[in-house]
């Protein structure tokens, strides 16, 4: 079994502010409020959560190659 990293540093694409956060293991995080500029980050198309889009580590289910953290691979997230 793979070791799962629970810490991920999210970097805001708008202002570059970075912060290390602990990823949830039992929920999907679709939104993240940047402390630098207030932008609400949402997953990019094709990603299941903000950690997969903007973090240094993918979410735990993706790290374990279990697919996405919150939805079937065919589901899309509206922006």
Image (tube, grey):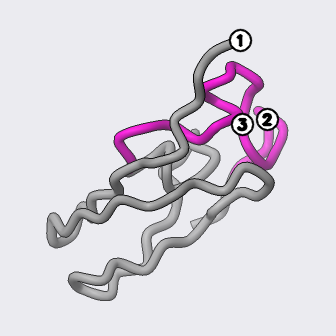
Q: Which residue is mark 3?
A: 68
Q: Secondary structure at mark 1?
A: loop
Mark nearer the N terminus (3 vs 1): 1
Q: Residue at x 34, y 78 (%)?
A: 34
Most frequent secondary structure within the magenta stretch: loop
| Horizontal relation, residue 77 to residue 71: left or right | left
Task: Tell me if mark 2 has few (under 14), some (14-19) or many (20+) residues whose alpha carbon lies within 10 angstroms of its own.
Answer: few
Mark nearer the N terminus (2 vs 3): 3
Q: Which residue is mark 2?
A: 74
Of tags 3 and 1, the one toward the viewer is 1
Q: Mark 1 to mark 2: distance in Å? A: 26 Å
- In the rendered image, residue 58, in percent from the top left (x then y), is placed at 51, 37
Q: Secondary structure at mark 2?
A: loop
Q: Residue at x 68, y 22 (%)?
A: 64
- In the rendered image, residue 32, in percent from the top left (x then y), is placed at 48, 72
Task: Tell me if mark 1 has few (under 14), some (14-19) or many (20+) residues whose alpha carbon lies within 10 angstroms of its own.
Answer: few
| Horizontal relation, residue 43 to residue 21: left or right | right
Please tell me the numbered disc located at residue 36: none
Q: Which residue is mark 1?
A: 1
Q: Secondary structure at mark 3?
A: loop
Q: Which residues are magenta?
A: 55-76
Q: Mark 3 to mark 1: distance in Å? A: 18 Å
- In the rendered image, residue 48, in percent from the top left (x then y), is placed at 64, 46
Q: Residue at x 44, y 61 (%)?
A: 21
Of tags 1 and 2, the one toward the viewer is 1
| Horizontal relation, residue 46 to residue 33: left or right | right
Residue 64 lies in the magenta-colored region: yes
Task: Tell me if mark 3 has few (under 14), some (14-19) or many (20+) residues whose alpha carbon lies within 10 angstroms of its own.
Answer: many
């Amino acid at each position: 079994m793979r070791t799962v990293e629970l810490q991920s540093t999210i970097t805001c694409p708008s202002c570059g502010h970075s912060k290390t956060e602990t990823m949830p293991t039992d929920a999907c995080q679709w939104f993240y409020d940047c402390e630098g500029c207030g932008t609400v980050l949402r997953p990019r198309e094709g990603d299941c959560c903000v950690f997969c889009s903007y973090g240094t580590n993918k979410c735990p289910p993706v790290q374990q190659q279990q697919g996405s953290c919150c939805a079937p691979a065919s589901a899309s997230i509206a922006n």
